[in-house]
Each structure stands twice: as C-alpha cells, then as structure tokens.
Image (cartoon, helix red, strand yellow):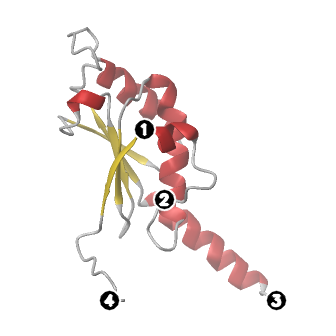
C-alpha cells in the first residue's frame, strides 16, 4: 500500500502530537533503598536529570511528592494521553535518558502499552506496576 506525501506528513504530525502528551512524574522525596536522608535527595537528583534529558523533546517532566514506592526508590511514573501508566523503581540520575525514551515510546504506542521490544533495559528491570487508563474496559473473551 502506497501513502501520499500528505498522509506521511499527517502521520508524522500525529506522532509528534502524541509525544507532546507524554508526562514523566518523578518522586522528589525518594531517599533511595537505604532510606538515608541526603541533601539533595536521590529523587531530586533523578528529577533534575530527567528535566535535562527531556529538554526540547516535547516530553513533560513533573516532580511529585511520593509515589508510595519507597522500598524501590527512587521512582518515576509515565503516562501519555489515554495510555496505561507505568511505575518504575530502583532508578538513579543515569536512568533519566531511558525515562525519556520510554515516554516517547509510550506516547507513540497506538494501543497505549509500552512496547517491550526496544524498551531500555532499566525500564524492563525496574518495572513495578502498570495501571490501566481510567476509561479502560477489558474485552470479554
């Protein structure tokens, strides 16, 4: 099947619009697995690195106070318009680029599910949970 230049341009615009709706939430109160209070907190370092990694990407980064994943912190979550929400733990500032890549992949996933293939390893190992979109209805089998 051949596509016209306009259809290809429209598809590219749709993909860019999808990326614009992706958001990464980074817990800024995470202390890390040992629970020791540091200044700055590991969650704050992860948030700052994620903001820097997302610069110019269209991905939004929002600091949040506590994702209730303290035993696996530092933690972050990501979602895109109508997608599932993914929560990751055991992160550090070096994981920031992987979070941005994952958010971009999620935003472009037509089914709202973060693809396993191509997902950065830290987002495979660090997955804690995924939750469905608010309007989700399981198809009866």
- Mark 4 or 3, which is nearer the eye? 4
Q: Nearer the viewer, residue 73 or 63?
A: 73
Q: Which mark is residue 21?
A: none
Going from N to C along the chain, the mark reached first, 2 or 4, is 2
Q: Secondary structure at mark 1?
A: loop
List x then y, in percent, for residue 61.
Answer: 37, 42
Residue ranking furthest to the front: 141
Circle 2 is placed at which residue position?
A: 114
- Mark 3 or 1, which is nearer the eye? 1
Placement of 111 over or under 128, stated as above or below: below
Q: Residues within 10 Å of mark 1 (few under 14, many from 20)?
A: some
Q: CA gap, disc 4 to disc 1?
A: 30 Å
Circle 4 is placed at which residue position?
A: 140
Residue ranking furthest to the right: 2
Circle 1 is placed at which residue position?
A: 126
Q: Secondary structure at mark 4?
A: loop
At horizontal 37% and vertical 66% (from top left) the residue drawn is 81
Going from N to C along the chain, the mark reached first, 3 or 1, is 3
Q: CA gap, disc 2 to disc 4?
A: 22 Å
- Mark 2 or 1, which is nearer the eye? 1
Q: Is residue 55 visible?
A: no
Going from N to C along the chain, the mark reached first, 3 or 2, is 3
List x then y, in percent, for residue 83.
Answer: 38, 66
Circle 3 is placed at which residue position?
A: 2
At horizontal 24% and vertical 25% (from top left) the residue drawn is 30
Going from N to C along the chain, the mark reached first, 4 or 1, is 1
- Mark 3 or 2, which is nearer the eye? 2
Q: Residues within 10 Å of mark 3 (few under 14, many from 20)?
A: few
């Amino acid at each position: 099947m051949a596509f016209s230049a306009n259809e290809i341009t429209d598809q590219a615009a749709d993909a860019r619009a999808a990326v614009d709706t992706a958001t990464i939430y980074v817990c800024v109160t995470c202390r890390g697995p040992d629970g020791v209070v540091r200044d700055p907190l590991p969650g704050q370092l992860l948030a700052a690195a994620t903001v820097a990694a997302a610069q110019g990407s269209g991905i939004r980064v929002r600091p949040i106070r506590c994702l209730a994943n303290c035993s696996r912190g530092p933690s972050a979550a990501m979602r895109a318009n109508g997608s599932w929400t993914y929560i990751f733990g055991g992160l550090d500032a070096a994981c920031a680029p992987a979070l941005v890549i994952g958010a971009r992949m999620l935003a472009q996933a037509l089914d709202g599910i973060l693809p396993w293939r191509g997902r950065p390893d830290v987002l495979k190992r660090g997955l804690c949970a995924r939750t469905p979109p608010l309007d989700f209805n399981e198809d009866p089998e």
